[in-house]
């Protein structure tokens, strides 16, 4: 029997008190909010409802003890959302942490399973 090609797969997330604060999907939502200035638009781009996205944000803030997003109610200028300074810093730090991690895991896998 010929061995099949195997690949390493991994998921990374940050926890606080045993609860998930952030992972790639939640951080992608934050990035999209930063880019679009809207929770609604960011949620739509990810194929999720506003309510679902809002629930993610509330859980992240509660579990992490960080205010990530500020919202403004619609009107003449329209509503919107933006990352707080803490939110931008958290996104930046997560991105720095995540950078190169997949490549590192793949390298370790190849070394172990030559």
Image: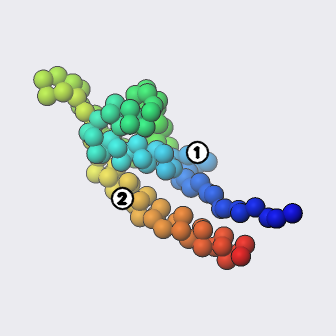
Query: Which residue shows up at 40% across the image and 28% down it?
Result: 50
Residue placed furthest toward the right: 1
- Whether residue 58 can be seen here: no
Q: Position of residue 23 (x, y in %)?
A: 51, 50
Q: Residue 92 carries which label?
A: 2
SS for tag 1?
A: strand
Q: Is residue 96 left or right of residue 37?
A: right
Q: Residue 19 carries which label?
A: 1
Can you tell which quarter of the image residue 39 is in? top left
Name above or below for residue 44 compared with residue 88.
Answer: above
Q: Position of residue 26 (x, y in %)?
A: 46, 44
Q: Which of 111 and 28 is in front in this view?
A: 111
Residue placed furthest toward the front: 1
Name above or below for residue 27 compared with residue 79.
Answer: below
Query: Which residue shows up at 41% across the image and 42% down it?
Result: 29
- Whether residue 69 can be seen here: yes
């Amino acid at each position: 029997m010929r061995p099949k090609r195997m690949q390493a797969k991994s998921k990374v997330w940050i926890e606080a008190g045993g609860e998930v604060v952030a992972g790639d999907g939640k951080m992608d939502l934050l990035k999209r909010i930063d880019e679009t200035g809207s929770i609604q638009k960011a949620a739509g781009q990810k194929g999720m409802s506003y309510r679902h996205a809002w629930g993610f944000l509330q859980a992240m803030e509660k579990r992490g003890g960080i205010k990530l997003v500020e919202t403004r109610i619609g009107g003449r200028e329209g509503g919107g959302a933006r990352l707080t300074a803490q939110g931008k810093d958290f996104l930046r730090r997560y991105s720095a942490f995540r950078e190169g991690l997949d490549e590192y895991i793949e390298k370790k896998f190849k070394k172990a399973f030559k």
